[in-house]
Image: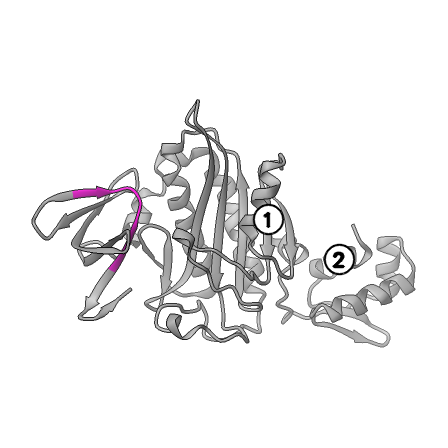
């Protein structure tokens, strides 16, 4: 581990408390000069580290730079290894390369910014620096491909719980994998899998999670202003909410992962799904079909009634809710 990473981890474990340069040097078995250089480098990276003559260095409670070290004090799960980047094209694209090279299960890539973030159906995902969590998780499950829907549903519930716990807002789910707060989309979850066609099992699954936590300096594209929102209206100054949310998601995922096919998340997923009993548009191949959302079935497919009274079950696809004339979400 680099000296600056070791210094950051030590300061994270003592956030809000001054640590002398001598203590840091002794604990990390490096020179005082190495500590001074590491502090300067961390400050240049944007970390809020205060210094005081006679007291030493303190990582401010207001420090909001997401890092493996900021997550570590809150992470109790053992199956995950985390790497954090300032900017990548896409966390999922980067993790896919590692998965194909044999990367072990549980590897997590997080970025402060994505320049080519992807949502469902190949759409771009707005991923500006500063305000979001852009994370991809590598899993190598043993269940059949047909059972993978439980994984996406599990993540939607776990992300909703983590946001509610640390932000104090209510989360709802739009089938199949969008999370809404304040009637706007704040999170998208993408599931990418590699299939062994002979056994119909999954060689790996990548769970991509993009959460708009608070506003960033980057403006939201005008075409997305009425659709995309943020969990919080402004940056919090009393806690490192992004690190807490990430740690909570991973802690709970480790607990849930061995028993995904027990349908433990079905009832909660269904209760959070705000499209049920609502008029919707089913969007397939750029065509819209009017329907009413009736039910979420135990395999997480969507049961709908078409305008002609016929019943269909959707296992994939996209829907939008018709709130009123010319307004959808």
Whole-percent x, y for residue 254 in the image: 52, 41
Whole-percent x, y for residue 292 in the image: 16, 54
| Label 2 secondary element | helix
Residue 169 appears left or right of 33: left
Whole-percent x, y for residue 22 in the image: 89, 63
Judging depth in this view, the residue of 211 and 57 nearest the camera is: 211
Residue 5 appears left or right of 191: right
| Label 2, label 1: how far apart the Cα atoms are | 29 Å
Judging depth in this view, the residue of 303 and 288 nearest the camera is: 288
Residue 143 vertical placement versus 116 (above, below): above
Residue 300 vertical placement versus 31 (above, below): above
Residue 271 tag number: none
Q: Would you name the residue on which mark 1 appears?
A: 94
| Label 1 secondary element | helix
**Mark 2 burial class by Cα count in 10 Å: few <14, some 14-19, many 20+:** some
Judging depth in this view, the residue of 275 and 126 nearest the camera is: 126
Whole-percent x, y for residue 83 in the image: 65, 51
Mark 2 / mark 1, whichever is N-terminal: 2
The residue positioned 52% from the left and 52% from the top of the image is: 248
- SS majority, magenta: strand
Q: Quadrant of the C terminus?
A: bottom left
Q: Given the current orientation, which residue lies at the most extreme top position?
A: 198
Q: Would you name the residue on which mark 2 appears?
A: 10
The segment highlighted magenta reads 312-320
The image quadrant of residue 313 is top left
**Mark 1 burial class by Cα count in 10 Å: few <14, some 14-19, many 20+:** few
């Amino acid at each position: 581990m680099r000296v600056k990473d070791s210094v950051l981890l030590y300061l994270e474990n003592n956030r809000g408390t001054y640590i002398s340069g001598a203590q840091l040097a002794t604990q990390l078995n490096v020179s005082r000069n190495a500590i001074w250089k590491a502090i300067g480098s961390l400050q240049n990276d944007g970390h809020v580290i205060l210094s005081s003559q006679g007291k030493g260095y303190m990582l401010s409670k207001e420090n909001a730079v997401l890092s493996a070290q900021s997550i570590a004090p809150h992470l109790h799960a053992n199956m995950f290894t985390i790497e954090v980047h300032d900017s990548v094209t896409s966390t999922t694209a980067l993790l896919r390369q590692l998965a194909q090279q044999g990367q072990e299960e549980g590897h997590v890539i997080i970025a402060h910014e994505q320049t080519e973030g992807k949502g469902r159906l190949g759409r771009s995902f707005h991923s500006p620096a500063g305000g979001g969590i852009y994370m991809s998780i590598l899993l190598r499950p043993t269940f059949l491909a047909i059972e993978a829907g439980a994984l996406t549903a599990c993540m939607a519930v776990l992300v909703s719980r983590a946001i509610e716990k640390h932000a104090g807002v209510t989360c709802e789910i739009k089938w199949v994998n969008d999370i809404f707060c304040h009637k706007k989309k704040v999170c998208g979850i993408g599931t990418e899998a590699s299939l062994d066609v002979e056994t119909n099992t999954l060689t790996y699954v990548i769970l991509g999670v993009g959460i708009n936590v608070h506003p960033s300096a980057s403006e939201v594209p005008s075409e997305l202003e009425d659709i995309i929102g943020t969990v919080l209206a402004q940056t919090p100054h009393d806690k490192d909410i992004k690190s807490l949310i990430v740690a909570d998601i991973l802690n709970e995922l480790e607990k849930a992962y061995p028993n995904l096919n027990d349908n433990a998340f079905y009832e909660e997923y269904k209760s959070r799904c705000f499209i049920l009993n609502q008029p919707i548009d089913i969007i397939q191949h750029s065509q819209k079909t009017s329907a009413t959302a009736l039910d979420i079935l135990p395999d997480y497919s969507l049961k709908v009634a078409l305008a002609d009274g016929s019943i269909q079950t959707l296992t994939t696809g996209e829907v939008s809710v018709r709130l009123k004339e010319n307004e959808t979400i």
